[in-house]
Image (cartoon, grey):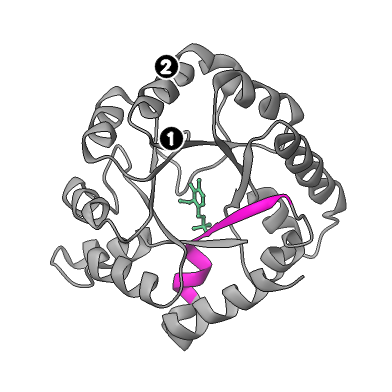
Amino acid sequence: MRLGVNIDHVATLRNARGELHPDPLEAAKFVKKLGADSITIHLREDRRHINDNDAKKICSIKKIPVNLEISTNAKIVKIALKIKPNFICIVPENRKEITTEGGLNLKKNKIQIKKIISKFRKKNIRTSLFVNPSLDDIKISKQLGADCVEIHTGRLANLVKSNRYYLNEYKRIKKCSILANNLSIEVHAGHGLDYKTTHLLTQIKQIKEFNIGHYLIGESIFYGLKTIIKRFKKILKRK
Ligand code: PXP
């Protein structure tokens, strides 16, 4: 099970000052050195954290596998095709959201997403779709030619964090992971993950990659990136 570290919030902190520090490029290199398997960055349409220059510089370091999250916005897709990250994850975007609120509406955007996936395929870029834990969405992802799905774990994370009944949501994620794996789609998980939810999801063997941002960066303020990445890596190694 691989650990993808989302470093968007290093850029959030930098942007709070409007200056250059802390530098997401340095964060990408550092996090990789500490054992992250890949780096995730989200080039949002409003550029609220990572900007074009960050994305360009981070994606140009060939030793760091970069997962670039983007919306279906034509201008952003064009930029992504130009900077050629290793991996793309297509996500929905709403202007007023604080963070990505749900999975893609695949039913509504089938044609558009299929076209985008085939553009990335031509450039040998692995493409993932950020989806809700829905069996229908997994089947549609297959029809659209996605290499991977990233299952939105935000609902599960909220239920676990607020000590509410989470088993149904967990089972939904598990069923979707099994289906995707049977359809030869690689399964990733992301959103709202902390130690407890990550640990819980490691029981689903089909999940190959975890993309973790806000909690990991938040914990690092107290204990440092080295300790926190080590801790997440240890959780992901559990059999
Ligand atoms: N995966 C995707 C597709 C996301 O949009 C995000 C949030 O940017 C994450 C993972 C990371 O979520 P979090 O910051 O809550 O760990």
**What is the x, y in percent for residue 132?**
65, 37
The N terminus lies in which quarter of the figure?
bottom right
Q: Badge 2: few (under 14), some or many (20 or more) residues near its Cα, within 10 Å? A: few
Q: Which mark is residue 111?
A: none
Is 152 left, or right, of 36 in this rendering? Answer: right
Q: Position of residue 29 (x, y in %)?
A: 29, 69
The image's mark for residue 93 is 1
Placement of 166 over or under 142, stated as above or below? below
Residue 223's spot in the image, x, y percent?
47, 87
Instruction: Indicate the quadrant where residue 90 lies.
Output: top left
Circle 1 — which element?
Answer: loop
Say what amino acid the circle numbered 2 marks: Lys
Side (left or right) of 131 relative to 93 = right
Q: Which residues are magenta?
A: 206-218
Q: Which residue is mark 2?
A: 115
**Could you tell me which residue is drawn at 76 percent across and 29 percent down?**
135
- Whether residue 214 appears in magenta in the rendering, the answer is yes
225 horizontally vs 55: left or right: right
Which of the pair 223/65 is nearer the observer?
Answer: 65
